[in-house]
Image (cartoon, rainbow, N blue to C red):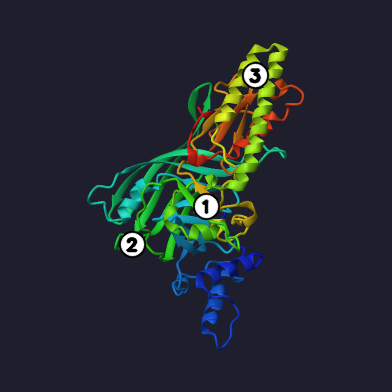
């Protein structure tokens, strides 16, 4: 939930206000009216008063600000911290964030219950078409897209990752009446079991948007964010600039030379604005280098050798069924599009405010430089490894952000990323009991930019 925890987040709020205003200090002196104005803004936004400021006060601020409200919660405020070709990042004083594109909430960050980490197909959004003034020439009134929700797993296990990237498919229709647009639709999460795909979660929603007099801005909206959060209400006090149209998202590969001092990822993104899109798939971001590749290749060769030894062990035991499955698993592993990476996705809103999500491209890890790669894919679920699920197999989830979890029931709902189908652990001979965990860790290095190649079904 978005909360303005003013006193506990003083330093984070101060850093954000510095970013907004460009001032390097918040000390107020009679000789520096600029910092005096900054301090006044700071006290207004992040002071001890727990109530959201009055609209007349917010309207005096020299930067974009909006009221935000989650369903029946009290309204709070968010301010625009950064804007670019891949989104507008609006922050609370507690460093929670909503990312907007052409009036639509497309991502959230640091909310306590769950977060939307991806919205696909934004170039086809009818709302964006309306804002571009094309409604008279025929904007589509239907839209299909996919969202990914990062949320706690249903079954607590202290030895497993506690979050999943749940995948929902959305379809909605639009009606415009003057300045008001209504969007009604449905969000469905599917599960697949025994070759049958069925809905296991379903939510109806009705969004509303009010446009400005000139039709270029969404000035007020009610938008469904996720199952746990329901609706978010936005009431823009000071507007941000209009987002320019962007084409459909494409895979991005940036060549970054070795530099001294070593840059952080946010600097690389800022220096390449045209290569990033509002629906860029940030959980699939990878950073590669030749030096990492050389170390990874040796480990890959070692794993391939172990799988061949596993096959020969089954052959020695005379178990022809397991021999065939081990050979299939070995061939799949050899064909997986893997490439060493020391980053498995980032949160772009937190990348701008926290070092944890803003890694250094360390000079020691790259001989000739780095490749920063983001895939256009929204990580449609893929089954890799063995082709068929049976009584002798088990399944593992490997999410784009690198989290690995052994699955007790694959029918609970589709997750983003990969499902590894492999031999059941209790059927692995002594000395090979860690093979499944090792295969899952290799899949953390899946190259989403390469698409589905061998080993995926």
State the residue position of label 3.
Answer: 392
State the residue position of label 2.
Answer: 212
Residue 451 picture location, percent across and down: 48, 37
- Rendered position, 103 above or below 38: above
Q: Residue 159 occupies which quadrant of the picture?
A: top right
Query: Which mark is on residue 166?
Result: none
Q: Give the mark toward the camera: 1 or 3.
A: 3
* 65 lies left or right of 367: left
The N terminus sits in image quarter: bottom right
Q: Residue 441 occupies which quadrant of the picture?
A: top right
In this rendering, does residue 42 appear at all? yes
Q: Nearer the viewer, residue 177 or 427?
A: 427
Q: Give the mark toward the camera: 2 or 3.
A: 3
Estimate how packed mark 3 is, as few (under 14), some (14 to 19) or many (20 or more) residues with alpha carbons within 10 Å. Answer: some
Q: Give the distance between the C-alpha atoms of the residues marked 1 and 2, in whole angstroms.
A: 24 Å
Q: Give the distance between the C-alpha atoms of the residues marked 1 and 3, in whole angstroms.
A: 40 Å
Estimate how packed mark 2 is, as few (under 14), some (14 to 19) or many (20 or more) residues with alpha carbons within 10 Å. Answer: some
Disc with the residue nearer the chain's start (1 vs 2):
1
Q: Give the mark toward the camera: 1 or 2.
A: 1
* 361 lies left or right of 158: left
Residue 339 picture location, percent across and down: 57, 40
Q: Which residue is depicted at the point 58% across and 47% down?
A: 290
State the residue position of label 1.
Answer: 108
**Extreme right residue here?**
430
- Rendered position, 300 above or below 44: above
Q: Which residue is depicted at the point 64% across and 33% down?
A: 301
Disc with the residue nearer the chain's start (1 vs 3):
1
Residue 303 picture location, percent across and down: 66, 31
Disc with the residue nearer the chain's start (2 vs 3):
2
């Amino acid at each position: 939930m978005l909360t303005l925890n003013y006193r506990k987040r003083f330093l984070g709020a101060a850093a954000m206000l510095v970013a907004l205003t460009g001032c390097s200090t918040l000390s107020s002196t009679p000789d520096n009216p600029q910092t005096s104005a900054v301090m006044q803004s700071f006290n207004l936004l992040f002071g001890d008063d727990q109530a959201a400021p009055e609209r007349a006060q917010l309207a005096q601020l020299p930067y974009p600000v909006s009221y935000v409200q989650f369903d029946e919660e009290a309204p709070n405020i968010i301010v625009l911290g950064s804007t670019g070709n891949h989104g507008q990042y609006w922050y609370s004083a507690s460093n929670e964030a909503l990312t907007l594109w052409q009036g639509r909430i497309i991502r959230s960050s640091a909310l306590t219950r769950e977060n939307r980490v991806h919205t696909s197909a934004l170039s086809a959004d009818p709302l964006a078409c309306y804002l571009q003034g094309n409604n008279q020439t025929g904007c589509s009134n239907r839209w299909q897209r996919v969202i990914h929700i990062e949320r706690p797993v249903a079954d607590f296990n202290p030895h497993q990752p506690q979050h999943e990237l749940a995948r929902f498919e959305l379809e909605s229709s639009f009606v415009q009446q003057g300045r008001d647009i209504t969007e009604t639709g449905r969000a469905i999460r599917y599960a697949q079991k025994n070759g049958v795909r069925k809905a296991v979660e379903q939510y109806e929603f009705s969004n509303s948007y009010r446009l400005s007099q000139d039709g270029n801005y969404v000035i007020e909206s009610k938008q469904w964010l996720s199952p746990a959060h329901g609706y978010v209400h936005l009431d823009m006090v000071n507007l941000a600039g209009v987002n320019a149209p962007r084409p459909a998202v494409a895979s991005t590969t940036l060549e970054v030379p070795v530099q001294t001092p070593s840059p952080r990822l946010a600097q690389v993104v800022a220096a390449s604005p045209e290569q990033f899109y509002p629906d860029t798939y940030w959980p699939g971001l990878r950073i590669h280098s030749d030096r990492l590749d050389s170390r990874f290749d040796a480990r890959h060769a070692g794993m391939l050798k172990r799988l061949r030894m596993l096959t020969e062990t089954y052959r020695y035991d005379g178990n022809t069924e397991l021999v065939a499955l081990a050979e299939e698993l070995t061939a799949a592993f050899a064909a997986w599009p893997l490439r060493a990476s020391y980053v498995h996705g980032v949160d772009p809103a937190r990348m701008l405010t926290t070092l944890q999500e803003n890694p250094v491209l360390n000079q020691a890890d790259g001989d000739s430089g780095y490749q920063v790669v983001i895939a256009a894919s929204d990580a449609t679920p893929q089954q890799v490894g063995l082709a068929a699920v049976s009584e002798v197999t088990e399944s593992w989830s490997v999410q784009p952000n690198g989290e690995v979890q052994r699955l007790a029931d694959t029918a609970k709902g589709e997750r983003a990323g990969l499902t590894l189908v492999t031999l059941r652990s209790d059927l692995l001979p002594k000395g090979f009991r860690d093979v499944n965990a090792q295969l899952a860790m290799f899949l953390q290095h899946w190259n989403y930019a390469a698409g589905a190649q061998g080993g995926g079904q």
